[in-house]
Amino acid sequence: MWRTGGGLGGALPAVLGRLHALAEPPTTATPGAGPAGRAAGKEQELPAGLVESHPAVRALDCLLDYAAGRAAKDGGMPGDVLGLAARGGDAAVAGVLGARLPLLHRHATAFAAAHPELYALVPGRPPPAAAWLHDRRGPGLDPLLLAALDRGQLLAARREEPAGAVAFRVVHALLTGHDGLLGEPRAAWRELAAGPGGAEAASGFLMYLALFTSMRPVDRTSVDTEQVWWSAALEAGLPPGALAGAGDFAAALPDEVWLPLARRSAAHTPAQEDAGRVAERAAAHPGSSDALLLAVHLLTRPAPEGAYDGDVRRHARALLRDAEALPAPECPAETAQLRRALVEAGEVDLAGAPATAG
């Protein structure tokens, strides 16, 4: 009904008028401030727990839904509804506007350009862009709207939420042709990892890159985005722990791409995510120096109460066994390093005996 106004007949103007009256910002009572005892222009904070069901918020939602129908029909949005949208408000109002932000961005371009606060991502404030970014049920991924946000503020939002809707939207945009969304990759990594929580944010970003790569989204257009960004992370001088999320690439990428990048990531951050799977994949390549060194790095990873990951040790033993079984000319020189790393990890039976799978 609200998308067309159909079914209301001649009552539509009265209904819209009533909704406009309800959607006006509530004001606080001030003695002597007029016949209704209200201070003009002073907004009243909506009661906690009632923001989403408050009549003003629900009326604004209805009006924006009606405006959406008008936009789909004639390409424009009613100016009086845009006037209400411009007033901003609390988190509930921001949520209502955030759900319609893609619509405003496309069908009310002059209005949106005149109100940059719609796109702001300022900590401690409820702008519509923040509501849209964090809404997991949101109205689509919309890479073009994402590109309209301030790059520095977008990276700060990623840092505040290492794993979630923001990361999902950003990585999807990068893989679907919006390669320049965050600027030059190495500089973006450094900015993302700067400050408190930066290492966790960088690790989470790698995790989402790996997730999307393994999912093979049908709308992706960039063929090597994850390789470019993973390589850039290795070259960006990130803080300890920042490359832990690279472990999730164990389920993605061809071996010739994955092995050298995984080895370098484990050298930087031995405590890789899903280290058992990483070690298992490495164990399939006993003739590869990268695979043996990857296992060596994984064996140095810190673990709870000083214990080493049993799966990592088991796969590393199998890798050592198969490497030592190769003809001498094919056996990598790093085999001795792997044996030593296993012994130091607690596999003391390997100190002077041939390797056996545990």
Image (tube, rainbow, N blue to C red):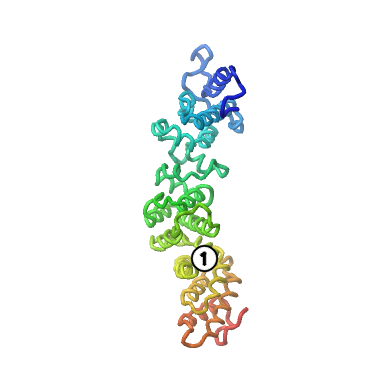
Quadrant of the image containing the N terminus? top right
* Residue shown at the point (54%, 40%) measured from the top left: 139
Q: Which residue is mark 1?
A: 271
Q: Is residue 219 left or right of residue 234?
A: right
Q: Nearer the viewer, residue 304 or 333?
A: 333
Residue at point 51%, 30% (across, down): 73
Q: Residue at x 55, y 57 (%)?
A: 215
Can you give x and y, in whole percent of width and height, for residue 187 in the image? Answer: 37, 55
Q: Is residue 31 above or below residue 192?
A: above
Work out which quarter of the rendered image holds the C terminus and state it. bottom right
Q: Is residue 354 above or below residue 144?
A: below
Q: Where on the picture, by quarter, is residue 135?
A: top right
Question: Dot 1 lies on which element?
Answer: loop
Classify 10 Å Cα crowding around label 1: few (below 14), some (14-19), many (20 and above).
Answer: many
Q: Position of residue 27 (x, y in %)?
A: 52, 22
Image coordinates of residue 285 in percent, x first then y, are 52, 76
Looking at the picture, tell me which residue is in the foreground, 83 or 358.
83
Front in this rendered view, residue 182 or 269: 182
Residue 90, image x and y in percent? 51, 32
Q: Would you place residue 169 above or below residue 102 in this image?
A: below
Amino acid identity at mark 1: Ala
Q: Is residue 270 left or right of residue 235?
A: right
Residue 51 figure quarter: top right
- 103 lies above or below 292: above
